Image (spheres, rainbow, N blue to C red):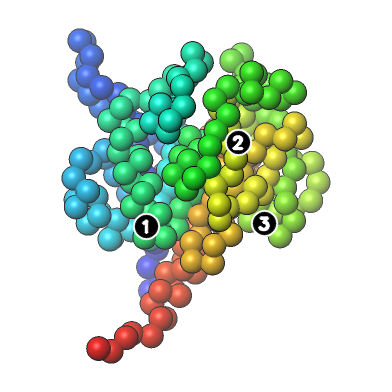
Amino acid sequence: MHRKPIVGLNADYRAAKKDSPAYSFLAAGYYDRILAAGGIPLIVPPMESEDDLSQVLDGLQGFVMIGGQDLDPRRDGFMLHPSVRSMERRRETFDRRLMRLIAERRMPFFGIGVGMQLLNISQGGNLFLHLPEDLAEAIPHKDLQDPAHRHSLTVVPGSLMERVYGEGEIRVNSIHHMAVDEVAEGFAVTARCPDGVVEAIESEMPDWFAFGTQFHPEADSASALDVRIFEEFIDGVNLRSREFHEMPMLVA
């Protein structure tokens, strides 16, 4: 019997307030897409113990890092722009620890929105903090009047993005004001908006299946083609699991 891969998901976090307790939450689209693609989602809470987190990762075959509010640029040596709406500190601290462990393990990884941004930062890249100021020629990438705002996309031949979308006009949802600037070493841009803004990156390293999208294929505004990104991810996770189990064991 084929065993489905177990795929981790982090969650958003809201600290306790005067009238409500602290709680974690997650849009259902993330785990529904993993289930539909043939994986088993496992939600991982913001854990403080690295040993505990490592034990959890031991039981996973891949990880999807969800979107959310902004990373605090001060943690990467940059000034805080007034437009930045930082995520809760507990979540960001956990996400950064989680990203480091995933990278060390070369665990199959799919980052969405801020998840892709953290992938890029963690591996040595950086970000535009506010597109309207950093790229004057950029089209609007966040329409406050239309959460399902979509724009066109250009994909790189031979990439995972091309396998998903093929040729022809492509449109994806867009709800961000930060974006990848310099791409981390070992990664390549595989999709851009016509204004040049990076919308997807993929690992070029043979030992790490990892990629990210700035847009949100898990959202209600996603198309049937967008959803295929999760199928490509699960296929990649399965392939790497088979390769791992087929590796010859070393005898001492």
The numbered dot on residue 181 is 2
Q: Residue at x 54, y 25 (%)?
A: 129
The residue that disc 1 covers is 104
Q: Say left or right for 136 vs 207.
A: right
- Work out which quarter of the rendered image holds the N terminus and state it: bottom left
Query: Is residue 169 in view?
Result: yes
Tell me the SS state at disc 2: loop
Q: Residue at x 36, y 60 (%)?
A: 105
Tell me the SS state at disc 3: loop
The residue that disc 3 covers is 159
Q: Amino acid at mark 3?
A: Ser
Q: Amino acid at mark 1?
A: Glu
- The disc, 1 or 3, on the residue closer to the chain's N-terminal end is 1
- The disc, 2 or 1, on the residue closer to the chain's N-terminal end is 1
Q: Residue at x 33, y 58 (%)?
A: 60
Residue 225 percent location from the top left of the image: 65, 46
Q: Residue furthest front?
A: 77
Q: Would you identify the image quadrant in which residue 22 lies?
A: top left
Q: Residue furthest right?
A: 168
How crowded pointer 3 is (Cα within 10 Å; few <14, some 14-19, many 20+) is rated as some
- The disc, 2 or 3, on the residue closer to the chain's N-terminal end is 3
Q: Which is more toward the observer, 72 or 66?
A: 72
Query: Is residue 36 in view?
Result: no
197 w.r.t. 56: above or below: above
Q: Which is more toward the observer, 50 or 78?
A: 78
Is the residue under label 1 in contact with that under label 2 (CB below 8 Å)? no
Residue 36 percent location from the top left of the image: 48, 51
Q: Amino acid at mark 2?
A: Asp
